Image (cartoon, rainbow, N blue to C red):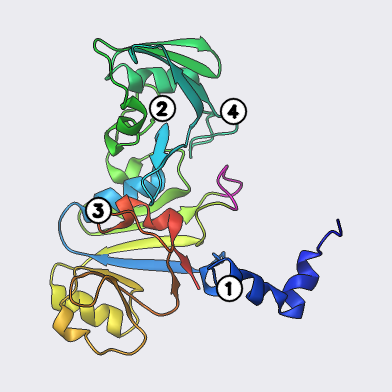
Amino acid sequence: MTRIDRRALFASGAAAALLAATGASLADTPKKGGTLRLAVPRDDSLEQVARGAVFDTLTEIAPDGTLRGELATGWQTDSDARVWRFDLRSDVAFHDGAALNVADVVSVLREVGRAEALTPDSVRLELAEANPGLPFLLADSRFVITREGQGVTPLHAANGTGCYLVERAEDDRHFLGRKVAGHYKDGAAGWVDTFEIIVIPDARVRAEALRDGYVEVAALPEGDDLKGQRGLRYHPSESDMALAVAPHVGMPRQIAARRALDDGRIAERWWRA
């Protein structure tokens, strides 16, 4: 079989035809760089999205609802779904430079059951009652992995393993995160260089900030101020405007449906087109 040279493929324009045949488009391809700014109301949105950028969990629920590993590379259980083993990534560091340690994971899992280290890269968890859905549960933000003894600190001091470290944060007002160099998700998530969240309580002002180019995404804007605006996109629809998005923002084809803000993963999943 002849090997296809990818550079030649894109240069020849054949890439567009190939992507069209597979249902994708060049606009769907994430691009690295730039800043993505999000305007949110004064609710838990800033906290939800910022912590989704800064912290990781053992597992993650993808936008299509499937389960995948994040800090865990795999897991298995007994026939009763009561005793579990989780295998951990070995290439992960916290933002303060400390390597992820099995003790960090054990300290979090003790909130769920009896946890102990099996090896430097695996942990055993014994539940009081069977729970076949445990890996889905551990994707919840309640179980973000922190350094042993630190717990979930105020946002300005947050020290996680996520794609973005805290550069500046003011509770209920503002967050600025910067992409971690050499992160284990490079090439798969965390496309923009910096991610900013700005709390704007007034829905009309959020719409105005988007319309005037001060932000690229507005959560729960005043829809009447944006309808008919050329180029903007809306999620899930123009009549039900949970998110309004500037035309130069790249959005995943599928957005997690549990929460409008892509389950708090906008910083990882969206990009500047």
Residue 177 visible in rendering: no
Q: Amino acid at mark 2?
A: Arg
Q: Amino acid at mark 4?
A: Ser
Of tags 3 and 2, the one toward the viewer is: 3
The percent coordinates of residue 37 (x first, y second) are 36, 68
Distance of mark 4 from mark 3, alpha carbons?
31 Å
Q: Which mark is residue 259?
A: 3
Classed neighbour count for the residue bearing mark 4: other residues with Cα under 10 Å, few (<14), some (14–19), many (≥20)? some
Q: Amino acid at mark 3?
A: Arg
Residue at 46 percent of width and 19 percent of height: 76
Which secondary structure, mark 2? loop
Of tags 4 and 2, the one toward the viewer is: 4
Q: Which mark is residue 20?
A: 1
Q: Which residues are magenta?
A: 181-187
> In the rendered image, which residue does mark 2 sit on?
147
Among the 4 quarters of the image, the one containing residue 239: bottom left
The answer to whether marks 4 and 3 mark residues whose Cβ atoms lie closer than 8 Å is no
